[in-house]
């Protein structure tokens, strides 16, 4: 596994930011491997992702508080009013998957994880149904059923939160988890819950989007992976894709075609999140 450091920056757009960051990495012995930046004219915001080889870097990156790095980088951050975060590619974040009865997104994530495509750990799968227990057993991942009804929603979310704490999850993935999470739950994990919605948002939000699409007679259907916010299916979009349909397709055809999109779109979004490629601003994302 490669070992690289990843600096993520967002700040007001100003002259000299790229040169200053590159010079900082160079002066402290780092070798830049990849550098991507985007200046958003409408908001006046600058976003940048710099990945560098820390082998000869003269600042301590092993301290989880990054005290040494922060001390030397803070003057630059203060000058340009930067929000910044430093990650390391060797770090494997812990991902808990929530799923209901549909298994296609779950199976795709577990296969890609087993094959090494997703550099994260999966300590637990949580479901409101027992149906996918055999899949979890096959991949040797613990599976917990937390029954959820209208009457016990608060208690079930409290149980899920407790499991998340015990297993020290860094982020959550809703792999067709067919429950609407409460605002209280969502606000505990800002920018840490990734969902897959089976439509090309912002079209056909909420329940039964394929049925909505069929009724509307669309010629394209899509899938959207996004971060979860308080507003249903309105969080910052990470990835989308579409497939063509025709007047000959039934609702069942749309659902079948959509399943292929859903699993690929969700896995892409998860991989980009794990690789620290997603920067948020407002209700948008930049994916480098």
Image (spheres, rainbow, N blue to C red):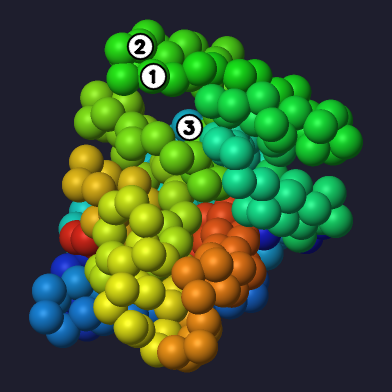
**Residue 19 position within the rendered picture, expressed as x and y whole percent measured from the top left:** 38, 80
Against 157, is 46 above or below?
below
Does dot 2 land on a helix, a strand or a loop?
Answer: loop
Distance of label 3 from label 2 (alpha carbons): 39 Å
Does dot 1 land on a helix, a strand or a loop?
Answer: loop
**Badge 1 vs badge 2, beta-carbon distance below 8 Å:** yes
What's the mark number on residue 157?
Answer: none
Residue at 85% in and 56% down: 115
Distance of label 3 from label 1 (alpha carbons): 41 Å
Against 178, is 272 above or below?
below
- Residue 31, located in which quarter of the rendered image? bottom right
For discs 3 and 1, the disc positioned in front in the rendered view: 1
**Residue 74 position within the rendered picture, expressed as x and y whole percent measured from the top left:** 32, 49
**Which residue is denoted by mark 1 in the rendering?**
149
**Which residue is denoted by mark 3 in the rendering?**
65
**Which residue is denoted by mark 2 in the rendering?**
152
Horizontal side of residue 6 vs 189, given as left or right: right
Residue at 12% in and 74% down: 43
């Amino acid at each position: 596994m490669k070992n690289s450091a990843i600096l993520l920056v967002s700040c007001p757009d100003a002259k000299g930011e790229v040169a200053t960051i590159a010079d900082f990495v160079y002066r402290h012995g780092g070798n830049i491997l990849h550098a991507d930046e985007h200046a958003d004219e409408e908001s006046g915001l600058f976003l940048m992702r710099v990945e560098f080889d820390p082998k000869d870097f003269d600042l301590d990156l092993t301290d989880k508080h990054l005290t040494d790095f922060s001390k030397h980088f803070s003057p630059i951050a203060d000058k340009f009013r930067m929000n910044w975060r430093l990650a390391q590619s060797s770090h494997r974040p812990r991902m808990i998957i929530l799923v209901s009865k549909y298994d296609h997104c779950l199976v795709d994530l577990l296969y890609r994880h087993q094959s090494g495509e997703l550099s994260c750990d999966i300590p637990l799968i949580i479901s409101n149904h027992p149906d996918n227990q055999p899949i979890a057993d096959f991949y040797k991942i613990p599976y917990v059923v937390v029954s959820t009804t209208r009457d016990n929603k608060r208690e079930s979310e409290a149980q899920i939160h407790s499991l998340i704490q015990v297993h020290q999850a860094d982020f959550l993935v809703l792999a067709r988890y067919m429950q609407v999470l409460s605002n209280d739950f969502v606000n505990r994990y800002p920018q840490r819950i990734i969902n897959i919605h089976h439509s090309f948002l912002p079209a056909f939000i909420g329940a039964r989007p394929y049925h909505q699409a069929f009724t509307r007679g669309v010629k394209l259907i899509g899938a959207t992976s996004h971060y979860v916010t308080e507003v249903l299916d309105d969080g910052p979009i990470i990835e989308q894709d579409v497939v063509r349909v025709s007047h000959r397709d039934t609702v069942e055809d749309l659902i079948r075609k959509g399943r292929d999109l859903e699993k690929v779109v969700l896995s892409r979004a998860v991989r980009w999140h794990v690789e620290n490629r997603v920067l948020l601003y407002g209700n948008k994302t930049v994916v480098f």
